[in-house]
Each structure stands twice: as C-alpha cells, then as structure tokens.
Amino acid sequence: MRKFLFEKRKYGFELLMDLHTFENNPNAFFEPNPHTCDFFEIMIFEKASGTMDLNGQVLEVSGNSLFFICPFQKKSCKIPLEDVKGFHLVFQNNFLANFFDDKLFAYRLQYFYNSQQPQYLLLKNTDYDIIRFALNEIIAEINNYQNDSSHIIRSLLYFSLSKLNRLYSTFYNISPDTQSDNKIHKFKELLELNIRKAHSVNDYCDMLEVNRYKLNRLARAQTGHSSKEMINNRLLQEVKMELRYSTKTIAEIAYDLNFSEPNNLTRFFRKMEGVSPITYRKSAQNDSFYH
C-alpha cells in the first residue's frame, strides 16, 4: 500500500505543517487506490463531488464537506479533479503537541481519533466563509514568511481547529469541551497505542490509574458512549482495516489482535457489524475502490 510522507523542508526551512488550495495543487492525495499518510490531514471541499472511503466508511464528497484523517489511517478517493475547489491542511504527528505545548491536543479535538462518529463534517455557508477566511490568511503567511509569521499562523490555526471542533460537536451532538479532565483524552491516546492487545475496560483503568466508574462517566460526558463502547468501536475499526486491506486469514487477524481464538473474533464482529468477517471481507473486495 502506498504511503505518503510529509515534506518538512518544502519551503527551504523546516515547517511541520502545510496548507494549500486544491486549485493550486489539484492532484493532492486524490489517490483512488487505498493509501496512508504519516501526517494529519483536513480536506476541506468548497466545491467537489464523488466519494471517499475512510476507515471502512464510504462518505459523500460535496460542497462544504470536510474530512479529518489521522496519521496512518487508510483511505481511498474517488473524486473527479474537474472544478475541485477547497483547502488541504496537513501537519505532522507531533506538530500540534509541540506547536500548542500540549501533548494531548489532537485527542482533545472530537474529529480526530473518533471511532464513534464519522470523521466527516458538512458546513453551512456562513460557517464555511469564516473558516475560509482564516485559512487564506494562513496561506498568505506561509507564502510571505516573516519573523512573526509563526505566531500569526499559530493563532489562526488554533482558531480554525477549535472552531471546527465546536461545529463538529454540534453536528453530532457531542461535547465540544476541549478542557475536560485529561484522563478521557489520555484514554483516547491509549486506545490508539494499545487497541491491538488490550480490549477490556480494566486494562485501561489500570493504565490510567482510575476506577471504572470514573472512566465510564468521563467517556459518556465527552463522547456519549461508555468506555466499553469506545473500546469496542475502536477494536471493530481495527478488525475492519485488517479485513479490507490485508490478506491475513481470520485466524491470523485474531492472533494479531489478541483474541484468544478466531471464533471469539467472529462472534465479536458479528455482534458489532451484523455479518461475519468473511462476508464483510467479500463485500469489501467487491467494492469498486479495490478493482
């Protein structure tokens, strides 16, 4: 599978983020075959059509639609290049943490590392106009980089990401609070780091040094789901990615994801998805993205 790598010194100096319009770079990562990137992406379409397969979900691309992609998540794009208009914002994995001096910043944003809701948002025209203004200002600073540009970019980027977090949270009726108890954001980070081996609430309670009641309360307040539902949803996403993008057998996937036996993976998947892993895999292989 093709992997795109971030280019740190594109402008002749190190800048761990980039932003451009699709009009000026129309071929930017509209790869029709499954691929992954080593950086965050926010794809903001002012005008476009087609579909995007992200985390096993086929989502419609339309005007004022946004897609939020985390490092090493897999996607496929089926987007005609004619008349595409919008923005492509990218940054490396540690960029937000360093830029905002907050290791958990990416996990505070509801649209990243979210296996409960789609990493997709549709904006009203008035909201899109606000985001477009801020992004155009960032592009102007990058193209005319001066001593104070990093501070201007920081403030505009923080505004844009935080504003999008509010809009996303409203869209899906979840909490927009980015300053809630750090335990819940640390839980999201631990899910990403450990989901292939740790599946129980007790596993994460031990890592976080918190009891089940508190973790469950924090999870419901932030996401509307219990801590166990968050674990299961993230595990389901991982199983789907293996079924869609690997040639491993069900037994091999079960072993790699720390299920005690293949039948337990099958029971889990059928309970969560309503079909067997084999049926799901056959359906994915018939998807036009994989032809």
Image (cartoon, rainbow, N blue to C red):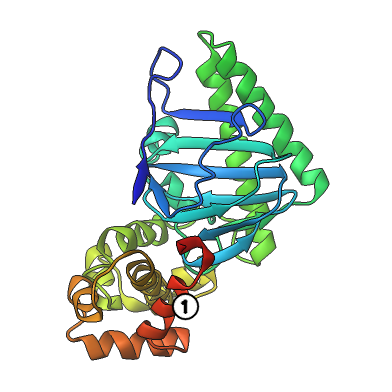
Tell me which corner region of the image, top left, top right, bottom left or bottom right, holds residue 249.
Answer: bottom left
- Quick check: 282 left or right of 259? right
Residue 78 at what x, y percent from top left? 58, 54
**Mark 1, residue position:** 283
Extreme residue in the right direction: 126
Look at the image and tell me whether residue 233 can be seen.
yes
Look at the image and tell me whether residue 163 can be seen.
no
In the rendered image, the vertical position of residue 249 relative to residue 148, given as above or below:
below
In the rendered image, the vertical position of residue 214 relative to residue 134, given as above or below:
below
Judge by depth and name the residue closer to the eye, 286 or 54.
286
Extreme residue in the front direction: 291
- Quick check: 233 left or right of 250? right
**Residue at (45%, 63%) from the top-left corner?**
290
Residue 166 at what x, y percent from top left? 65, 52
Residue 274 at what x, y percent from top left? 47, 89
Residue 61 at what x, y percent from top left? 67, 55
**Residue at (60%, 65%) from the top-left corner?**
174
Judge by depth and name the residue closer to the eye, 49 or 289.
289
- Quick check: 174 left or right of 54? right
In the rendered image, the vertical position of residue 253 relative to residue 122, given as above or below:
below
**Residue at (18%, 86%) from the top-left corner?**
261
Q: What residue type is labelled 1?
A: Ser
Tell me which corner region of the image, top left, top right, bottom left or bottom right, holds residue 212.
Answer: bottom left
- Quick check: 207 left or right of 46? left
Is label 1 in a helix, a strand or a loop?
Answer: helix
